[in-house]
Image: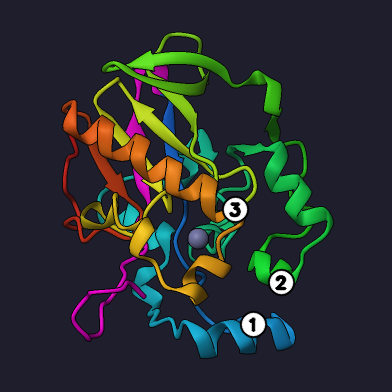
């Protein structure tokens, strides 16, 4: 995937991140892979050949929450970084939650090119329903730890900022939680790869929505990490029950 990297196989866990906020707010960022059979046609076959997922029934996000004494029905909001299969597979487990998407996500849904990597069969019936759609112009400039970002303050109290991290997919976002932890989604494929985009080989470059923008997002993430923000990528190997702070 990267020039100069030693050959080897790397396992990418698919993270989902729960924030317990004030006033009973429980915000889930991404939902992992779908368990069971995927009814996703030839696109799904192609995807699974390229990126063979290993998913057991125990990996179901609702099961994982229950194992941590969190009732899935108590999740009030689900924020999706983007619509790739390893981020949307558990969306159907939270029919009661307020879904938060971006205009870029809807653009992808409207014209799902193969390269966009969206498998409609993984999304629940009627998706996105009455989701809150964050428009491109809702993201306003904001400086965090001396780094310029564009963000939507989801609850108006600064606790949960949905941050524009463009490049990997149209409308791709992360979440800055309590000004300390940045859930970076696929802004980079790992904490150790924040500045690796310039070394990315041709094929992985080609699957980014916009490689140049993706590279710049990597630079932003690198600066945030250097400024003391805890940057956590979706595919970082954090512990099952690690409290991020
Ligand atoms: Zn992705």
- Vertical placement of 164 versus 129: above or below? above
Tell me where residue 8 appears, x and y as whole percent: 22, 85
State yes or no: Cβ of the residue under disc 2 lies below 8 Å from any atom of ligand 1: no
Q: Disc 3 to disc 2, how far (Cα)?
A: 25 Å
Q: Is residue 4 magenta?
A: yes
SS at circle 1: helix
Disc number for residue 121: 2
Residue 150 is covered by the magenta coloring? no
Looking at the rendered image, the quarter that the C terminus falls into is: top left
Relative to 49, does residue 3 appear above or below in the rendering? above
Residue at left offset 47%, top offset 82%: 51
For mark 2, give the secondary structure: helix
Number of other residues with Cα within 10 Å of mark 3, as a class: few under 14, some 14 to 19, many 20 or more: some
Q: Is the magenta stretch mostly helix, strand or loop?
A: loop
The residue under label 1 is 44
Name the foreground residue: 221 vs 53.
Answer: 221
Label 3 or label 2, whichever lies nearer to me, is: 3
Q: Crowding near pointer 2: few (<14 within 10 Å), some, many (20+)? A: some
- Residue range in magenta is 1-24
Count of marks overlaid on the render: 3
User: From where the camera sits, is residue 81 visible?
Assistant: no
Residue 147 x, y percent position in the rendering? 34, 21
Q: Residue furthest top?
A: 157
Q: Name the residue under label 3.
A: 210
């Amino acid at each position: 995937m990267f020039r100069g990297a030693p050959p080897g196989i790397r396992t990418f866990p698919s993270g989902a991140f729960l924030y317990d906020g004030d006033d009973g707010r429980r915000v889930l960022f991404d939902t992992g892979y779908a368990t069971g059979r995927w009814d996703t046609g030839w696109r799904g076959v192609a995807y699974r050949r390229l990126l063979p997922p290993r998913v057991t029934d125990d990996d179901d996000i609702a099961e994982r929450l229950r194992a941590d004494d969190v009732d899935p029905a108590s999740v009030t909001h689900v924020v999706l970084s983007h619509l790739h299969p390893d981020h949307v597979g558990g969306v159907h487990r939270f029919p009661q939650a307020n879904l938060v998407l971006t205009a870029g996500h809807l653009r992808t849904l409207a014209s799902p090119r193969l390269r966009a990597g969206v498998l409609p069969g993984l999304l629940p019936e009627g998706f996105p329903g009455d989701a809150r759609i964050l428009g491109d112009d809702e993201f306003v400039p904001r400086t965090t730890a001396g780094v310029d970002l564009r963000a939507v303050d989801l609850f108006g109290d600064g606790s949960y900022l949905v941050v524009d991290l463009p490049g990997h997919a149209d409308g791709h976002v992360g979440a800055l939680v309590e000004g300390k932890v940045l859930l970076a989604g696929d802004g980079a494929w790992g904490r150790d790869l924040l500045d690796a985009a310039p070394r990315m080989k041709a094929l992985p470059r080609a699957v980014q929505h916009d490689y140049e923008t993706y590279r710049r997002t990597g630079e932003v993430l690198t600066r945030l990490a250097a400024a003391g923000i805890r940057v956590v990528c979706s595919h970082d190997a954090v512990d099952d029950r690690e409290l991020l702070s």
